[in-house]
Amino acid sequence: MSSGAARRPQVVAHRGASHTRAEHTLGAYLTALDEGADALECDVRLTADGHLVCVHDRDLRRTASRPGVVSTMDLAELDQLDFASWKNPWAELDDDAPDKDPDLDKVLTLRRLLETVADHDRRVELAIETKHPTRYGGLVERRLLELLREFGWDRSGTPVRVMSFSWTALQRVQRLAPDVPLVQLIERAHHWPMLRPVIGDDWMLGPGVQELRDHPRLGESLVRTGRPIHVWTVNTETELDLCLGLGVTAVITDRPAYVRDLLDG
């Protein structure tokens, strides 16, 4: 791996240690903490009864192996589902597999994740992505900030930053909690010229690593802004080298232990 990075980027566990554990489960996040992740990343969606849960997809087919839309279900309904078996469907046939702890494999509420971070024995940051479009619109951000306020994490010094592909969602957060850091996610290189005039002066940038690889001029343009850059999803040594060459602030990875090992030589 190349050397000479200006500073070590923050290692952010994407949906937890999701390369080895089922994404967005408490088990995945506890593993990421054990592996020394500097920060945890999660996606949040709102249930029908107003709870924020850590789920990426709007429907449940991939991660809970059944039909259903998160926004139309109550938390109690989601709580009955197994969100981990899809990751290792043959585990029940493995006599050497450790006994499962159902609490680690259920739907994870954002409140539970915040409590886990608050109780941890070192500072851990949180990168929370609000998913759009959604039937609840701006209610997602309002519920998020209500919850952050309970933890005292809606003000300067908060360990939380909010990310979204929706710049209007980030504008809502800025109006409601001006001191919460914001990251404008960038899905396609050709979106950047349209986003640049409308995003806040102090927002950070979150490009995908594939776009940086496929469009080198995108990385050059982002670096010239002088803004912190948080790149997703960085899972190989080649991808990490690209990030180090750009001097990015954070790398979001499914493999926090592996990336830490690369950075630490």
Image (tube, rainbow, N blue to C red):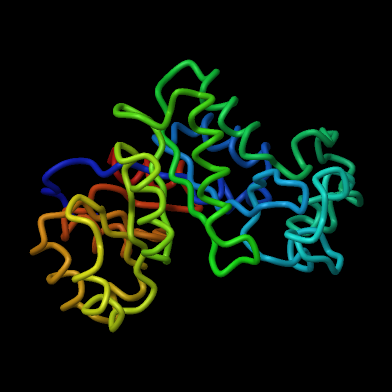
User: Where does residue 118 sit, x and y in percent of width and height?
Assistant: 51, 22
Pick the front one: 213 or 139: 139
Pick the front one: 94 or 75: 75
Q: Residue 216's image quarter?
A: bottom left
User: Where does residue 52 sit, x and y in percent of width and height?
Assistant: 65, 45
Name the residue at the front extreme: 175
Pick the front one: 248 or 87: 248
Q: Residue 26's image quarter?
A: top right
User: Where does residue 40 sit, x and y in percent of width and height?
Assistant: 48, 41
169 is higher (above) or lower (below) than 36 = below
Q: In which quarter of the image is the C terminus?
A: top left
User: What residue is rendered at 42% in x and 66% in y?
Assistant: 166
179 is higher (above) or lower (below) than 120 = below
> How many labels were placed on the picture?
0
User: What residue is rendered at 79% in x and 61% in y?
Assistant: 72
Q: Residue 260's image quarter?
A: top left
Q: In which quarter of the image is the N terminus?
A: bottom left
In the picture provided, is 106 more to the left or to the right than 43? right
User: What residue is rendered at 60% in x and 34% in y?
Assistant: 113
User: Where does residue 63 sit, x and y in percent of width and height?
Assistant: 74, 60
User: What residue is rendered at 49% in x and 39% in y?
Assistant: 145
